[in-house]
Every structure is written in C-alpha cells, then in structure tokens.
Amino acid sequence: MSKESAAAAQSGGGPGASRQTPAKIAIFAGTAVGMTVLDQISKIWIRDNVPLYRLEIPVIDGFLSIIHAENPGAAFGFMNDSPYRMWVFAGFTVVALVVLGRMFLELPEDDRFQNAALGMIVSGAIGNAIDRVLYQSVTDFVKMYVSHPTLKPWLVDKFGTAEWPTYNVADIAIVLGLIMIAIHSLFLEREQKPGA
C-alpha cells in the first residue's frame, strides 16, 4: 500500500480520498446545516402566514412575488400524479447524497470553494426531502414572472408561459452550489493547475 493510500485509509476514505480535517468538515457541515435551517424556517413562516394559493405579495412589480404553493412532484409538475413519486424521490435523494458524500471525501482539504458548494447542494436535497417526508409535498413560495406587455406574449408564444415554476430556499441552494462547481471547473481549476 502506498503512503497516499495509507493516509486516505486512515482518514476514513478509500484510495483517492483526502484528509478530513476539522476545518473542512466545519465548512461543509456549517453550510449544509445553516442553509437547511434557513430553508425550513422560511417554509414554516410561509405555511403559517401566507394562505395557500390565495395571497400574492409583490416584491418587484411585474417580476417577483411571494406566494404559498405546494408541489407534490418536482419542477414543472414532474410526477405530480404518480403514486410512486415518494419512492422515486426518496431513491433519488439517497443516491444524490451518497454521490455528494463521495465527492466531499475526495475534495482537497484546502478547497473551501467546492466544499461550500457541496454543502449548499446537500442542504437543498435535505430541505426538500424533509418536506416530502413530513407533508408529502414541497412548500414553494418564490414566484418569478414577466408581465411586460411586449415580452409576456412573446414568452407565452415561445415557451407556453411567462412564469417560472415557483421555488424555495432549498432550490436556490442547489442552483447556487451547481453554479459554484461550474465556476470552479471552468475558471478556478485551471488557475490551480501548474502551467495552465
């Protein structure tokens, strides 16, 4: 066994795993727990204070508002009416968390950027999973739309709607985490490679 493999085994991972230092774990866990708590607090407030589908609170006129929506499926209504949706989503969440956990173990201990990104994605997966387990649906509340008299008809003609599906803090965390990983792959990773 090589020195690298032995070090990886001692750190709790297989070959290719990096050291799991307290700082690395703290960044990942802090991001994941913090965003999950923020997600759940925001959803609790929405469920307690905004009537379901009956009240819309404008934030930016013609573009952004707060509503209370419940989504038993996924984005764009995917699997809304399927009797197996809970099992499918549960399986997807477990697989996603296993993959993300493996990615975390393999991250260099000083890669705080991707560490935080993985924490964001994990928080999003956990946040929406909590909703599905407790309520059999996901609470969404951020509504983005276009009401401009020129843009709205064009969007409806091209895409069938001028509204983006409602979303929540968990969804935001997932998207931000994916964007961070893309930025790292496209720009930061090249800067870190010798001779790049």
Image (spheres, rainbow, N blue to C red):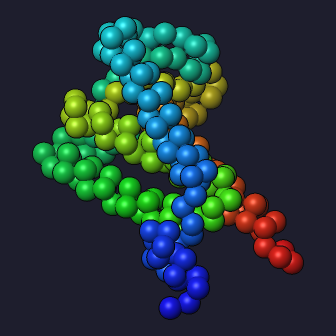
Quarter-wise, where is residue 24 in the image?
bottom right
Identity of the residue drawn at 25% across and 46% down: 79
Q: Is residue 121 left or right of residue 59?
A: left
Question: x, y percentage for residue 127?
Answer: 38, 37
Does 93 sit above or below residue 124?
Answer: below
Identity of the residue drawn at 44% across and 60% down: 101
* Count of numbered marks: 0
Residue 69 vs residue 8, the one in the foreground: 8
| Quarter that holds the C terminus | bottom right
Identity of the residue drawn at 42% across and 63% down: 99
Question: x, y percentage for residue 2?
Answer: 56, 90
Question: x, y percentage for residue 126?
Answer: 37, 42
Q: Is residue 41 left or right of residue 4?
A: left
Q: Answer yes or no: is residue 59 visible.
A: yes
Residue 131 vs residue 140, the one in the foreground: 131
Q: Which residue reaches farthest right?
A: 195
Q: Is residue 14 left or right of residue 89?
A: right
Question: x, y percentage for residue 4?
Answer: 58, 82
Q: Which residue reaches farthest bottom?
A: 1
Does 53 sit above or below residue 14?
Answer: above
Q: Which residue reaches farthest left?
A: 83
Residue 87 vs residue 165, the one in the foreground: 87
Q: Is residue 136 left or right of residue 27?
A: left
Quarter-wise, where is residue 69 in the image?
top left
Does 99 sit above or below residue 154?
Answer: below
Q: Answer yes or no: is residue 171 visible.
A: no
Quarter-wise, where is residue 67 in the image?
top left
Identity of the residue drawn at 56% across and 20% down: 64
Does 66 sit above or below residue 72?
Answer: above
